[in-house]
Amino acid sequence: MPATDFAIPEKYKYQNGFGSYHESEAVEGALPLGQNSPQKPAYGLYTEKLSGTSFTAPRYENQQSWLYRILPAASHSPFKPRESDTYNTNPDAVKLQQIPNQLRWDPFDLDASVDWVHGLHLVAGAGDPTIKQGIGIFIFAAGKSMDQESAFYSADGTFLIVLQHGVLDILTEFGPLLIRPDEICVIPRGVRYRVLLPHGPVRGYVLELYQGHFALPDLGPIGSSCLANPRDFQAPCASFEEDHSGSTQYTILSKFAGRLFAASQTHTPFDVVAWHGLYYPYKYDLGRFCTIGSISYDHPDPSIFTVLSAPSDHPGTAVADFVIFPPRWLVQEATFRPPWYHRNTMSEFMGLIHGQYDAKTGGGFQPAGASLHNVMSAHGPDMSTFEKASSAELKPMKIGEGGMAFMFESSLMVGVTEWGLNKCRKVQKDYNAESWEPLKVHFKRPEKKGETVKKMEKDGRPDLGTWVGES
Ligand SMILES: O=C(O)Cc1cc(O)ccc1O
Ligand SMILES: [Fe+2]
């Protein structure tokens, strides 16, 4: 079901549609008619273009927006490095360690003392934002709103924000977005925003995409609808502040190659009166996901639960997929229903928003925690899940009620930062010992050659009618 609803203030109005060309004006007539860059834009506004792709990107992937604002974003003092000793997510500095161990983290702590910008901790990553390749995986925990007179942007990549706890009131240049429990938000590279926390501390996960853009996955034989439907993605409507008196100092914080820089200006950065284009922030309620699954037998690949995919240049191989495991019915016959044991050429970073995850019933994978199963690192259900599922009566069964797990699945080998491995103090020492080392041997040779195997083949089959060769 959709995210918990509570009264949403009037100021949050949205336009619906994924990848749609949107336009919005907070003052009637602010959008120019029939052209993008008039000599004299309406009401004395400035015209500014925000490019999410190269100008010459093919039309099907080209993403640009036109902003009509009181002063252009360029009107600020030079940037200066800030907190350079403490704030550094640059791959050179974070000592990424690529290790084959399966890793699991206890829930990350809330931290009431910091704001959005300072509550971001890089846990794992691959590649390098300076060559626009790879991803960063962050945990965020914040308890303070950002300064009213500040805005933040990342030049490094697009943020996919997975909220685990609290509410985010995000004022973007394109208008406000209210992110509630079970909702995600995508803030494209360069978009300036301020995060306020109207309901106290927040916590969650961020996937920063250094290359490309998120897209809806192809649906193949599923057809033209289901999974995340385009209509359910919501973009903000233009809304602006008017403080250009020169008496207030505003700070623009830039995450640039993993480091923090600050510039100042004496006018609000949130002064976009109208905009149109294909490059904008948006949100999505995970409760609206239309989940597809097996209605006969076997456990399909988790790619059927892909919400958003950031494709690489190789079709079908994602830089990163954002996959969820929502509550759903399991009805498969004669099937071991949890995920199979597996080793994957893709890396799998998982988190839990709330509830329980069906592959790990041993209690170690908790909301606000995480796990990482890197390239080819073997994993699967823990011992208790295996024992229960392999002897369970296979009635139709609703699983994950009240739960929402997710996965950032990447074709890249992910390295873990010093913070993620040690400083956060959340890595579980006994993940293997609790999960897979206790797995029992169930193997039994057939007593009489041929006979038992034949019997098992028959008993183990799904009840799907007569099989070829069966009398
Ligand atoms: O490892 C995991 O728990 C994630 C996962 C789930 C699933 O249903 C199939 C494969 C897979 O990697
Ligand atoms: Fe997996």
Image (spheres, rainbow, N blue to C red):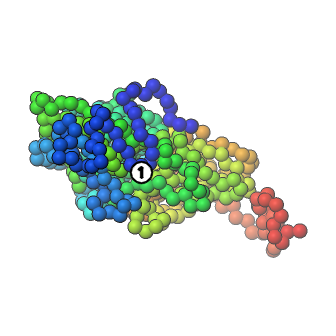
Residue 420, image x and y in percent?
Answer: 35, 50
Residue drawn at the location 31% of the way across and 37% of the way down: 25
Q: In the rendered view of the protein, which quadrant contains the C terminus? A: bottom right
Q: Is residue 161 left or right of residue 266?
A: right
Residue 47, image x and y in percent?
Answer: 21, 45
Q: Which residue is mark 1?
A: 19
- Out of 419 and 63, give the one closest to the viewer: 63
- Out of 460 and 304, give the one closest to the viewer: 304
In terms of image quadrants, where is residue 201? top left
Residue 471 shows in this picture: yes
Q: Is residue 114 above or below residue 135?
A: above
Q: Residues within 10 Å of mark 1 (few under 14, many from 20)?
A: many
In terms of image quadrants, where is residue 300? bottom right
What SS does tag 1 mark?
loop
Q: Is residue 462 above or below residue 314?
A: above
Q: Is residue 470 above or below residue 180?
A: below
Residue 121, image x and y in percent?
Answer: 32, 46
- Out of 240 and 115, give the one closest to the viewer: 240
- Out of 340 and 95, give the one closest to the viewer: 340
Residue type at mark 1: give it: Gly
Residue 445, image x and y in percent?
Answer: 75, 69
Residue 142 shows in this picture: no
Name the residue at the bottom extreme.
449
Q: Is residue 77 left or right of residue 126?
A: left
Residue drawn at the location 51% of the way across and 53% of the way down: 306
Residue drawn at the location 17% of the way across and 46% of the way down: 39
Q: In the rendered view of the protein, which quadrant contains the N terminus? A: top right
Tally of numbered tags = 1
Name the residue at the front extreme.
34
